[in-house]
Amino acid sequence: MNPSKVKSVLEQSLAWRMTVGPHTYNAFMLVHSDPKNVHWELSAGSSHHMDTDPAQSWHTASIGKTFTAVIVMQLVEQGRLNLNDPLDRYLPASLLQGLHVYKGEDYTDQVTLDHLLSHTSGLPDFYEDKPRSGKYFLEILLEEPNHRWTPEETIEWTKTHMAPLSRPGKKFHYTDTGYNLLGLVIEKVTGLRYHEALREHLFVPLGMQHTYLLHYNTPAVWAPGRVANIILGNQQIDVEDYPSLTSIFAAGQTVSTSGDLLLFMQALVAGKVVSPASLEKMMTWKGSRYGVDYGMGLMRVRMWPFTRRYDVWGHLGSVGSFMLYNPHQDVYITGTFNRSGYLHRVLRFLLGKVLYPLGKIKS
């Protein structure tokens, strides 16, 4: 198949997705493969009443968990952390008191960094789980956009409104709470604020000039235009007007571009940010849901049940964002559809309009 034909169909399909329900206003995508001589930077739709630019920045959501996990693994390689270390070795008792009380027994001192990285701590997810009573956290985030949350506040909110689901190490349960705790561990060990650690450990060394922690700092170089709008909870929002997004912190608060995420994934695959041994640990799949396997800050998506040809790994975000690598074809795909509740459509799109057609192009 002709690469230009594949690109043309992809561009048309991306634009068409902007016109059909459930509605999404904009999308960004970068497809790169050296053996197939492909580098396509695409966008569709509009944001802030202007056409999108493929180089525009956007909210990465949970893709940021990979950044957090990589910094933790770097600190492990440096001998400054151990994955089996208990959380209470690094964070104060005042914050951790009552964190993990399950069926009347306190397991807080048994929660390790490994548990937090692999979503096996048993802790609830403050962002998505149902609270004991009252509103979901997302409702509060949207209703109180000017509330600047500290990570400590999100931990206290979790302790007050939710309960653990299992003993540490016994069950997989995806949780943003654990990654906010890891962000605080990074701050304690490095002596840097989390956003400073991101810049020093990842963004500057890898040349990710447009990537930063929204509402905490600014990028080295601004991307064209403004940060793209997203649809969150069926409400279109300007993320720059929602300081309440600070609540997501080390669980996924970064803003980036498709190009910057390509730089990161290429470096990760090449062993330039963590060692092959560390990457292997991160890719030890410890839980699964909806065809997605979970390791330490990484996901593997089994795109098709009868073949591993189209499997990808990397990370997804709840707003339809993706940072993925397909080893079989040596293809990188980064981007977003900027709408919550859209991921299953995103994955179908990537399989049908990107991975499968690329398989028809000879390397």
Image (cartoon, helix red, strand yellow):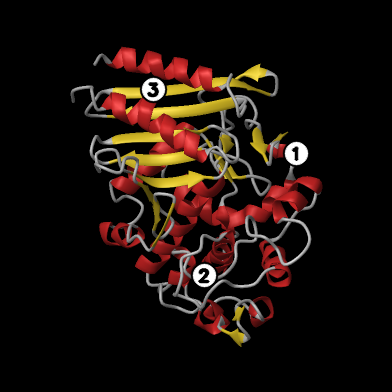
SS label for mark 3? strand
| Proximity of marks 3 and 1: CB atoms separated by less than 8 Å | no
> Quick check: can you spot residue 281?
yes
Task: Name the residue that disc number 1 marks.
Answer: 241
Q: Which residue is mark 2?
A: 189
Please say if the residues under marks 2 and 1 sit with CB atoms less than 8 Å apart.
no
> Answer yes or no: do the residues labelled 2 and 3 have beta carbons within 8 Å?
no
**Residue type at numbered disc 3:** Trp
Query: At label 1, which amino acid type do we have?
Result: Asp
Residue bearing the label numbered 3: 40
Number of numbered discs on residues: 3
**Which of the image's four quarters has the N terminus?**
top left
Residue at the spot 24% in from the left edge and 41% down from the top edge = 307
Categorize mark 1 by other alpha carbons within 10 Å: few (<14), some (14-19), many (20+). few
Answer few, some or many: residues within 10 Å of disc 2's Cα (few below 14, many 20 plus, some between 14 and 19): few
Distance, label 2 to label 3, CA atoms, is: 40 Å
Q: Nearer the viewer, residue 162 or 296?
A: 162
User: As drawn, is 35 to the left or to the right of 199?
Assistant: left
Residue 135: x percent and y percent? 77, 57
Residue at 40% from the left image edge and 74% from the top image edge = 82
Secondary structure at numbered mark 1: helix
| Residue shown at 79% from the left, 61% from the top | 134
Q: Which residue ends up furthest to the front in the rendered image?
A: 306
Q: Quadrant of residue 234?
A: top right
| Camera-nearest residue between 77 and 54 | 54
Q: State the image coordinates of residue 72 (x, y, percent, origin top left).
A: 44, 63
Q: Earlier in the sequence, mark 2 or mark 1?
A: 2
